[in-house]
Image (cartoon, grey):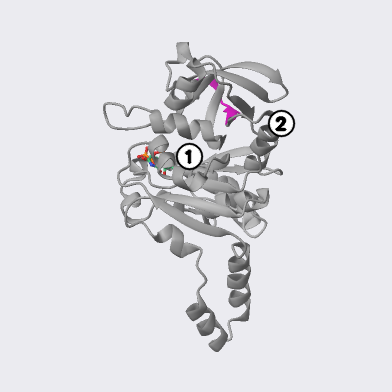
Amino acid sequence: MEIKKAIIPVAGLGTRFLPLSRAIPKEFFPLVDKPVIQYIIEEVKKTGIKEIVFVVSPGQKTVLDYFQKSPELEKTLVKRKKDKILKELKDFEEIFEDITFSYVVQKKPLGDGQALLQAAKKVNGEAVAVSFGDDVVDSDEPALSQLINIFNTCSAPVVALKQLPREKLPAYGVVAVEKIAHNLYKIKKIIEKPELSEAPSNLVVVGKYVLTPEVFQYLKKAKPSDKGEIILAEVFDKMLSDGKVIYGYELKGEWLECGDKLKWLKSFFYLALKDPRFKDELREYIKNLKFKI
Ligand code: UTP
């Protein structure tokens, strides 16, 4: 089963970024000079996938507008002889030229699983790649390609995993696993935000997956929680208790989280301090700061 589509849910509330997220959806926060979402689209493109389905909240058009061509701006740049900027704009537009974007609307933010369910009609019984809008991975091989490689040999859902220091685990979905090969596991259970003493491993779920049609069947059958939410991790857990196989793959690369203020700031610094255009000046600037760090 070839993977032709990627779903990117961007309909969450982003409450951890208030007040900024009232003005800008968190997927459009900058990482150096590009919005977070662009890193994710570039990752999808590198995997060879050409169809992207966004799950957006009602009225949130920023994500679709961002990837549109801007002929008016091009004309203005030509008139003003801004050749260098014009080239940059054309290079940017070229990145997305061969990708088709579409969207579905999630009327209310009722969970990541409910967001994916809205895209079910676009899936047509195929396996799909999924990336949340706030998880970037800096790696040689794109994170989604790493997952797709596993899917190509096992034809079952694949969940991206990363090791974290123990003290961080209670803020994440932590998996109980059986190791089957280098970086590859069978997931036995997913425990959302466990007490430290109950964390079954140091491996946590990253917001990147390959989902099979069966996952969508389970999403359709899932009973919403008391709060009306459908959570993907809970749906996986139901599949596991029914004896279904779900693989976990420990990603190679640096996980740049952008889900809260501190994580986003760290990801920003990581990329800025690596960027050949800025790194020397930035290091110098930090070294010469008047206050102690
Ligand atoms: P998060 O768990 O980060 O939730 O979503 P959130 O609502 O965006 O942010 P907080 O917790 O209020 O700060 C993970 C991914 O799932 C999407 C988000 O946009 C993000 O890409 N999501 C989440 C939806 O599309 N819909 C939802 O109902 C929930």
Instruction: Tell which circle, 1 or 2, labels the residue nearer the N-terminal end.
Output: 2
Give the magenta-colored segment's residue range: 160-166
Quadrant in which ligand 1 is drawn? top left
Dot 2, how many residues are within 10 Å of its Cα: few (below 14), some (14-19), or many (20+)? few
Is any atom of residue 5 visible in this view? yes
Residue 34 horizontal/vertical position (percent): 53, 58
Q: Are marks 1 and 2 in contact (CB under 8 Å)?
A: no
Q: CA distance from mark 1 to mark 2?
A: 34 Å
Q: 92 or 67, which lies in front?
A: 67
What label does residue 215 carry, if any? none
List the residue tagged with mark 2.
153
Amino acid at circle 1: Lys
Amino acid at circle 2: Thr
Q: Which of label 1 and label 2 is nearer to you?
A: 2
Q: 270 or 143, which lies in front?
A: 143
In the picture as drawn, the residue positioned furthest to the front comes out as 125
Dot 1, how many residues are within 10 Å of its Cα: few (below 14), some (14-19), or many (20+)? few
Residue 47 horizontal/vertical position (percent): 66, 48
In the picture as drawn, the residue positioned furthest to the left comes out as 226
Is any atom of residue 31 visible in this view? no
Q: Was residue 163 drawn as part of the magenta stretch in this picture?
A: yes
Q: Quadrant of residue 253?
A: top right
List the residue tagged with mark 1.
263
Q: 100 or 194, which lies in front?
A: 100
Residue shown at the point (42%, 15%) measured from the top left: 195
Secondary element at image label 1: helix
Q: Is residue 39 above or below residue 159?
A: below
